[in-house]
Amino acid sequence: MAAKRGRTGQRLELGLQLRQLRENCGLGDRGAGFTRKQAIQGTRISEAALQRIETGSLNFRNVGDLRKLLDRYGVTDDDVVESLINLNKESANRDWITQYRGVMPAGMPGFVGLEPEARSMRAYHPTLVYGLLQTAGYAQAVLELHKPVEETTSEFIRSSVEVRMKRQEVLTREDPVRLRVILGEAALRYPVGGVDVMREQYARIEKLSAWDHISIQVLPFRSSYRAAHDFAILDFGDQLPPRVQADNAWGAMSTSDKPREVDRFTRRFDSMVASALPPEDTSAFLHRLEREL
């Protein structure tokens, strides 16, 4: 039996179904469905709100507006209508992410909410150890480094570390996410928190790399090295379209399920897989770095 979706996954599922209904209802201009502007006529929601609903970042506050849209889309099956109304209702409930929204950068709550829904994930981190691989000591040290610049509090750092550790449960649950990570050499050489913190972090990566559902490669300094921003690709099987998440220089993140964007980052990841050291060399590389501390 498939696991019940989290709140973010439920909103995303609702949005995808509504977008498909809007685009395929065949009642708009030239039989090509409705535009969002056409769809919202007679409702109390804005075009921007409908866009956010369809992308999974918002749900309906007023169920009457959802009913009006479904009627406008020609949905007459009572079971379908009720299932979408229930999905909207369930997605409005609070989940564990809610209490941590204040410590996450823009766009991150939605991405974190989707991580448990993924069947597999691929990620590239060129300058810092990927969050799902970090120890609590490393995570705290990274946040402490940015504290004077970001003017964050000790409580903010504590909560941020809690979020990072909570996210890692996708790797240890009964049906874990299959994870493939490429770490840039700089991510492993950058001294964070001192010798003891780095040794603990190296040991953590080595331990995780031995698990059957986790593969970790190192991209060494060479001509193919790319100091680009972090990105991750989430695959949900045949339930939802894959999504790519990318960070930017301001600390915010964006996600997209557009096939062209997902394909572009997938090709980028695959090219780095070919340039990185094979997974079986990761342990030896870490031991070499540890001797240099």
Image: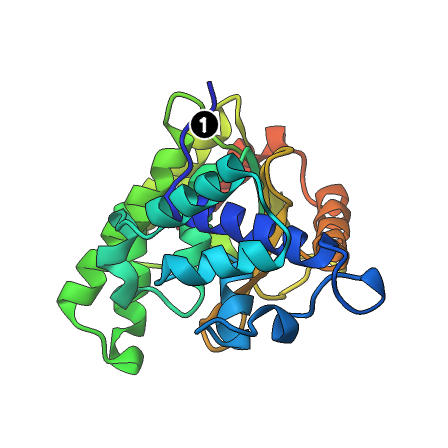
Structural crowding at the residue carrying mark 1, measured as other residues with C-alpha within 10 Å and reported as few (<14), some (14–19) or many (≥20) = some
Is residue 183 among the parts visible in the rendering? no
Q: Nearer the viewer, residue 34 or 49?
A: 34
| Amino acid on which the number 1 mark rests in the picture | Pro
* Image position of 255 with respect to 241: above or below: below
Picture quadrant of residue 70: bottom right
Which residue lies at the image location 58% right of the left edge and 38% below the top edge? 236
Picture quadrant of residue 159: bottom left
Q: Looking at the image, which residue sits at the far top? A: 1
Q: Nearer the viewer, residue 261 or 190?
A: 261
Residue 164 x %, y %: 32, 50
Q: Nearer the viewer, residue 38 or 188?
A: 38
Residue 156 x %, y %: 20, 66
Q: Looking at the image, which residue sits at the far left? A: 155
In this rendering, would 23 be left or right of 36? right
Residue 200 x %, y %: 32, 41
Q: Which residue is mark 1?
A: 176
- Dot 1: what SS? loop
In this rendering, would 87 be left or right of 233? left
Is residue 258 among the parts visible in the rendering? yes
Q: Nearer the viewer, residue 133 or 267?
A: 267
In this rendering, would 28 be left or right of 252? right
Which residue lies at the image location 70% right of the left edge and 55% below the top edge? 265
Which residue lies at the image location 47% right of the left edge and 55% below the top edge? 67
Residue 72 x %, y %: 60, 60
* Image position of 222 with respect to 171: above or below: below
* Image position of 239 with respect to 148: above or below: above
Picture quadrant of residue 36: bottom right
